[in-house]
Structure formats: structure tokens, C-alpha cells
Amino acid sequence: MALVVQKFGGTSVGDIDKIRHVASLARKCKEVGNDVVVVVSAMAGETNKLVDLCTTMMERPDPREYDVVVSTGEQVTIGLLAMALKTMGVEAISLLGSQIAIHTDDVYTKARIQKIDIEKIMKHLKEDRIVIVPGFQGIDTLGNITTLGRGGSDTSAVAVAAALKADACEIYTDVEGIYTTDPNMVVDARKIDRISYDEILEMASQGAKVLQIRSVEFAKKYNVPLHVRSTFTEAEGTWVTKEDKGMEKVVVSGVTCDKNEAKVSILRVPDKPGIAARIFGSIAEANINVDMIIQNISIDGFTDMTFTVPRIDLAQAMDIVNEVCEEIGAKDVVTEDKVAKVAVIGTGMRSHSGVASKMFKALSDEGINIMMISTSEIKVSCVVEKKYAELAVRVLHEAFDLGTETV
Ligand code: ASP
Ligand code: MG
């Protein structure tokens, strides 16, 4: 007998029939002898509607009251799911974040979970009930309602699993698992059976929409095995666990593509101490994530610097950079937003060489120019022209032999 936390996203609880189906999955898990805690998101689209209501009422919604409103989507689904189970004759109870309680800091709209009381959940599990927990919501030390940021239910589920020392956390979604690359881009993308936390973290940071990054950080920290799988089929999904020996044999696990980046170049920057700190310090203060940075060799005491930022932050980044440039006496700033970042990721890179060169060769064979390169221990990432993004992903998927195994 095990303790299992099951998490269902918005599309899995999108209407009454789907909620009934989720109830049947929870019941099945309970019937084979497990203790079951279910964490649910709001019904698909509901959180967006609540956000719209807030911004219609107030251009920049008061953060405390925004959380009071947007947290309600999950209250609806936990109640409905409990009803669905009861109509099946299964004992179940829903508990709000404040009733459990799920304690967070007081940063409204993007609060972080600090501690989860498990007494109430444990009591109901002992009394043979399925316990239903809302994703996304918590309370601060004063009892104010908080929310965890969009997509936060993944993090709620993993945090609940960690607090309960659950044997597994099943993340149910509308795809069958995590793929070697986006199946919409490459037809023979393959579902990955097992992958490490670190690889998923890299994939998420390179633009793959798999899990909320914070949920994976939590899972890694508390060593909670995650099973990402489909609500609508019985197939095994993808297990995300700590790295093991077998994983190292796979040199490259996946190819990612991020078309939401932009490139900024600052020309003729004086090459002296403190300049990079000045530029990137100001950008960091605005909470803008810089991913790649390249500094050219300096000539006559001047150099060029190029870096990438998320495209949605480009305008704000430019305001900052223009101001700083004037101050430090740089000559000009140029931007390029028709770029994409493609990356190959794999734990096996730690022990195998030649990944970068194979990647560069595969791209050059297709005449794709590399504008920027960055690497980590388990990732090589290149900026290319956006129009080549999909071609780049396909040739890399092929070059590293990631496609469906044919028998
Ligand atoms: N309902 C919230 C959202 O749409 C949380 C979640 O779905 O994970 O962002
Ligand atoms: Mg969601």
C-alpha cells in the first residue's frame, strides 16, 4: 500500500464529465489499496476569466484582492470532485488551502509555499477518505489568501507530496508524457520513459512547456518521483526522478526550441571593470532574465556585448539599456527579435564528449548560421534565425537519433 498524490490540470477537469472521469481514476487508485490525495486546478479557462474580471474592475488589480478572486476557480473543482466521488459511493472530502493549511509567504500573486500542515489530511486518510486539495492557493501568516503564480498547481501537488512523504506524485495532463521534442514540430518525437530532474529543469528553462519550474525544483529538493501521464489513456507516462546510472548512457535526451527570445547587442562598450555589473545589475533589478551573454574580444579598449532576454521583456530591457549606455558611453544598441534558441539537453553529456561539435555540424550541413552559443554541463544551446527554428529542431532530433524506435 502506498500514498499517492494525483494532480489534475485544468483540461483534465474541464467539464462535468471530465470531473467524473477524474473521480473514477482516483477511485481506482484507492481500490487497489492506496491512500489517495487529489490536487486539482481550476476548470480549463476559469482562471483566465477570473483574471479578466479583476482587470476589468481595476486596471492594476489590488494584489490581495486579486488572490481572493483568482483562487476561487480551484474551490469550485475540489467541491465538484468530492461530489462526483460521493455519487460513486466513495468517501471523500475537499479542504481549502486555508483549512489544511498550506502556508506561504505574503507575496500576493506569486507566493511561495513555506510549510504544509499534514494533520488534517492524515486524519481523513486514516478514516478512509480521498482528500481533495486545491492547487494554486495558500494563506500567509496572517491568514490572507495567497496564490502561487500561473500554473502553480503543479507546485502545490509536489509540495503536498513532499510534506506527506508520498510514494509518488502523478501529474495528469492532456498529453501522454514528456517527449524528446515538441511532437507538433517533429512527427517522430518519442515519449521519454525516464528523465532526471536536472534535465527537466534545463528543458523548462529552454522553453519547453512541461511543468512549472518551481514544482521540479521542489521535487528535486525533496526527492519526490513524478509521473507525468495522460488523464485520457492508461499508458505509462514519463517518470521524472533523480539521476541514476542508466540515464547517463543516454547522451542527449531531448531537443528544445524557444521562439520567444530576443537578442540585444551593445556596441563599443568601454572594456573596463564594473561595466558588465552595471548593465546586468540594472536588468536583474527589473526582474528580467538574461540567458546568454557574449562579450567580444576588445579592440582599442572597446568591446561589443550581446545577450538574450525574453521577447516580452525586450521593451523594458531596452529602456534600461539605453539609459545605462548613455551613462557608460557605449556607441549604440541594436536588437534582433527574429531569433530562436534551440538546445540539446542530456545528463550523458557529463561523461561523453563531442555533443557540441555534432550539433554545430548538423546545423551547418543545413546552412543554418549560429549566432550565439551557450553551454552548461548538460546542455548546448544555440541562437539561430527564427525562420530556421523548426528545421534546426528536426535536424538535431535526427542527428542525435531521438526518433521513434522502429522494429
Ligand atoms: N488555475 C491556475 C492557473 O490557471 C493554476 C494551475 O492551473 O496550475 O494558472
Ligand atoms: Mg493550468
Image: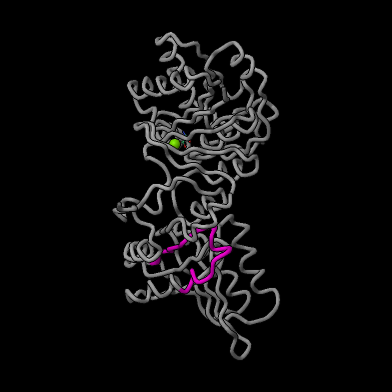
- Quadrant occupied by the N terminus: top right
Asked whether, in this view, residue 142 is left or right of residue 81, the answer is: right
Q: Is residue 45 visible?
A: no
Q: x%, y% of residue 287?
A: 58, 54
Does residue 404 lie above or below 9 as drawn? below
Q: x%, y% of residue 338?
A: 37, 67
Asked whether, in this view, residue 79 is left or right of residue 376, the answer is: left
Residue pictured at 56% horizontal, 12% vertical = 128
Judge by depth and name the residue closer to the eye, 358 or 132: 358
Res 289 → quadrant: bottom right
Judge by depth and name the residue closer to the eye, 342 or 404: 404
The residue segment tinted magenta is 339-357
Q: x%, y% of residue 196?
A: 54, 49
The verdict on residue 391 being magenta is no
Residue pictured at 49% horizontal, 41% vertical = 239
Does residue 283 lie above or below 97 as drawn? below
The verdict on residue 355 being magenta is yes
Res 138 → quadrant: top right
Does residue 26 lie above or below 246 as drawn? above
Residue pictured at 50% horizontal, 74% vertical = 265
Does residue 156 lie above or below 177 as drawn? above
Q: x%, y% of residue 84?
A: 41, 15
* Residue farthest along the bottom direction in this orientation: 300
